[in-house]
Amino acid sequence: MFLDSIKKKSSNTVLLLVLAALLVLPFLLSGYWIRLITTVFMFAVIAKSIDLMMGYLGYVPFGNVVFFGLGAYSAGIGMSHGMPFIVAMLIGVLVSTIICILFGTPVLRLRGHYFAVASIGLNGAIMAIALNATGLTGGAMGIIFPVISLPPDMINKVFYFAMLLLMLLAIGINVIIIRSRIGFAIRSIKSNEDAARSLGVNTTFYKTATWVISASLTSIAGAVYGYWMSYISTVDVFNIMVSVTSILMVLLGGVGTILGPILGAGIFQVLSEVIWSYFLELHSGILGIITILVILFLPRGVLTGLRELFLNRALSKKAVKTNE
Amino acid sequence: MLFEIILNGLLLGGLYTLMGTGFSLQWGISGIINLAYGGMMVLGGYIAFALHRLINVQPLVSIVPAAVILFFLGLLIYNYLLKPTIKKGSFFVTVIMTFAIELVLENFMLLMWASDYRIITSPYSSIAFNVLGFHLPLIKALIFTLSMLGVFAVYVFMNKTTTGKSIQASALNPAGARFIGINVEKMYMYNFGIGCAIAAVAGALASNINAFSVVLAGGLLGKVFIITILGGLGNIWGAALGGITLGLVESIGTIAVGPEYNEALGLIVMVVVLVFRPRGLIGKKFWDV
Amino acid sequence: MSNVLLEAKEISVHFGALKAVEKVSFQIKQGELIGFIGPNGAGKTTTINLLTGVFRKTNGQVFFQGKDITSVTPNQTARLGIARTFQITKPLVGMSVEENVMAGALFGKAGRNLSVKEAREKAAQCLELTAMMDKRYFPVSKLTVPDRKRLELARSLATDPTLLLLDEVMAGLRPIEIDDALELIKTINEKMNITILFIEHVMRAVMSISQRIIVLNTGQKIAEGSPKEISENPQVIEAYLGRKYMERRGTDG
C-alpha cells in the first residue's frame, strides 16, 4: 500500500510537470508547432468523447463528427447574427443535446451495429441538409467567422490555451464519471445490460446521457475550431474521416483509459504530419497499413502495450481507478 | 414521364439489389460490416476497364475476371487480416480493419489510375430501344438483366449447392454446423470472398453506364448501407426490396428535388427506417432466403 | 388492510403458438417464503420475467403493493423493490465483486440517496452476509459457480428489495453448499424481513423451508399449498413422474 502511494505520488508529479511544460511551450515554440499541438489537443477532445461511448459504454459512434459540425456551424451562424462566441457555442451544445435525445432514445436501444450505422447516416443527412440550406448555412460556400483583431502570434496562443482548457475539461469530466454513479451505470451497461437493468439501471437514460456528454464536448471543440480557422465548410466539419481517425487514435492510444486517447491523438498527428510531408501520395495507404498493424499486433493500444511492457503501474493507477 | 422515371428506378434497382446482396451476405453471414465494399466495387470497375482497354475484352465479359480476382482477394483478406482480428478484438475493431483495408485499396487505385473519371464505352452503349414511346438504352436493360441473373445465381448457390447450404448453416448455428463436420471458418471465408466478387461484378456492370473514380467509393458504400438497412439484414429479398426502393427514391428524387439532394434523400430515408423499424422494411433476423 | 405484497392475475405470455405461461394467478403476502416448482420448461423463469416486466406485451395484470405494475420495465421494478437473480448467472464482467454489489446498491430501491461511499459500505454488508468478503476485490472471472450464485444474491440484496425472486440459486451446488444456501435464504426472509419467491429443483430444499408452494406445469398453475399437501397432490406427482407412475401407484393403493 505504501509503495502504491509512492507510485501514485510520482505519477501525479510527472503529470504536473507535463502540465507545467504544456503551459510554457507556446512561449518557446514557433507558430507551426503551436498550431500542431493545438490540433492534437482538439483531436484529444474528440477522441476522448468517442472513447466515452466506445471504451466505457461499448457503442462506437462513427458519425460523432456530426456534433463537431453542428458546433462549428452554430458558432458561425450565431456570430454572424451578432451573438457573442460563448452564446453561439452554447447553442451548438443545445442543438447537439437535442439531437442526441431525439435519435439516441430509439437507436441506443438497439445493438451496437445499428447505432454505428445510424450515426453515420445521421452525419450524412445533416451534412447534406447543411449543404443545401443555403440561406442559413451558406451552402457550399461555408461560413466566415468574424475577424479577431489580434496579431496572428497572439491568436495562436489564445487558441492553444482554449483547446488545452477544453482538453483538461474533458479529462476532468472523465475522472468524475469514472468515480461517480454514472460511471457505475455505464460500466454495468457495457458488462451486461440485462443484469444492469435488473438492478435498476435506466439503461436508455444513461446511454443517452453518455452520448450527450460526448456530443457536447465534441460540439464545443467544433465551435472553437471554427472560430480559430475563421472559415468553415461542410466538407471539413462534417467529414466522416474526423471521427474515423479519432476512433483510430483511441485504438492506438488505448481504449477506456484516461490518457490513452490523448496519447493516440499525439502519436497520430505527428505521424500524420511526417507522412504528409514525405509521402503525400501514400498518405491514406500508409495510414491504412499502420492501422492494420496496430490492430494485429497492438490490439489494445500503445498505452496498454507499454503498460504491459514496463509494468508501469503509476500510469495505470491513474487511468483505471476503481477502489479509491 | 412518370413511367420513364419508374422504369429507370426499377432498372437501377436491379443493380442496387446485386450490390446490396454482396454486402448483406458479408454482414449477415460472416458478421462483418465491410467498409471496403465501395472500394472493391470501384476496383471491379477498374479491372473491367483495364481489361477492356488493354486487351480489348468485351466489356460485359470482363466482369468475370474482375469477379475472380476479387474473390481470391477476398479470401486472402479474410484469412490473413479479418480472421485474426475477429479472434482478438471486438466487432468494431474488425470494422476498423475493413476501413483500413479500404484506405489501402483507395490509395492503390489512386496510384494506378489517378482520380480521373473513367467509363467503359462499347458498341452497345449507344443502342437504345423504344419502349412504349420511352427511351430505354440497351445497356441499361443488359445491366439489369445481368444483375438479376447474378442475384439469381447467388440464390441458387446458397440454396441448392452443398457449399451454399453449409454457409447458411454456419451462419444460423455455428456450433451445430461444426458438429456435423462443416468447417465453419472456411465457410465464412468463402462467403466473404463471394461478397467481394459480387461487389466486383456490380462495380464492373456499373462502370458501363456511369463514370467512375476512386472518389466515388465512399458514396457507393453509403448507398449499399442504405439498401441493406432498408431491406433488412442478411436476406436476398431484403436486398431486393432495399435496392428497388433506393432505385425508385433516387429516380424520383432526381426529378423532384434535384440530383444534389439525392444522396441526402437516401440517407434521410435510411435514418428514418433505422429509428422506426431497425430490422428493416422486411425485418427478418437471420439469413434465410 | 391487506398484506398482499404481490398479486398476479391471469398473467399470460405467448411466443407465437407456444403458450409459455397461461392464465396464472397467485398471491404472495408480505413476509412469506414461497417455493415455485414445476418440471423443466413449465414456465417458471418466464413467470419471473413476466413479473419483472421483461416482456413488452403481457396479458393479465400484476399488482405490487396494491399498484398495477403490469407494464413497468425491469429497471423500474427493481427501483420499486423487486429484485431477481438469473438462472444462468449474469455477473457484471470486467468489474470486481465489490463493484458488482455496489451497482446493486446504487441503482436499487434506496439507490437514489446513496453516495458512492455509502454504496461501498452497503456492499460490504451484503458481502458479509453471503460470506464473500474475502473475495471482495476479485474479478468476476475468478469466481467458482457457487460464488457466482452468492454474488448474484449479494447484488440483489444490495438493491434493498421488498420482494426477492430467486431463480434456481442452488443449481450446481453440493449438499453442504445447499445447506448453507438454505440457511442464508431463511435468514434473509426472517431476519431481514424480505419476502421471497424461489424457483428450485432441489426438492428437499423446497420442502424444508417453504411455507407455501406453487406448482407450474406447461405454463399453467396446477397446484398451490403447504409442502405436505403438494407432496401428496396427485397432479403434481403426475407432472413430475408421469401418468404411468400414477396409474401404477393407484393399483398399489
Image (cartoon, coloured by chain):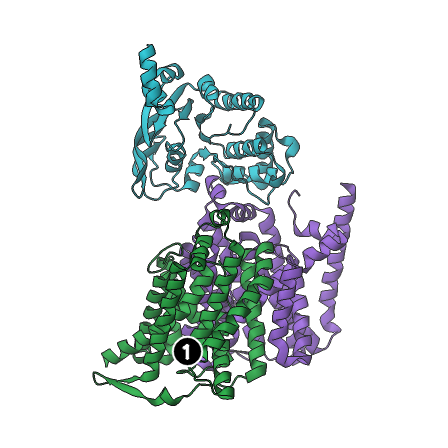
Chain colours: A purple, B green, C cyan
Q: Check the picture and name the quadrant holding the C terminus of chain C.
A: top left
Name the one closer to the observer, A296 or A321. A296
Residue drawn 72% across the image and 61% down it: A19
> Which residue has dot 1 on it?
B205
| Residue B234 on image: x %, y % | 41, 59
Does residue A246 lie above or below A277 as drawn? above
Does residue C1 lie above or below B240 as drawn? above
Residue drawn 76% across the image and 45% down it: A5
Q: Is residue B221 visible?
A: no
Residue drawn 52% across the image and 73% down it: B69
Secondary structure beneath label 1: helix
Q: Is residue B165 left or right of residue B188?
A: left
What type is the residue that disc 1 sits on? Leu
| Residue C244 on image: x %, y % | 33, 21
Q: Check the picture and name the quadrant holding the N terminus of chain C.
A: top left
Q: Chain of mark 1?
A: B
Q: Residues within 10 Å of mark 1 (few under 14, many from 20)?
A: many
Q: Is residue A167 left or right of residue B70?
A: right
Identify the residue at the far top of this view: C253
| Residue A165 on image: x %, y % | 63, 64
In the picture, residue A152 is in which quadrant?
A: bottom right
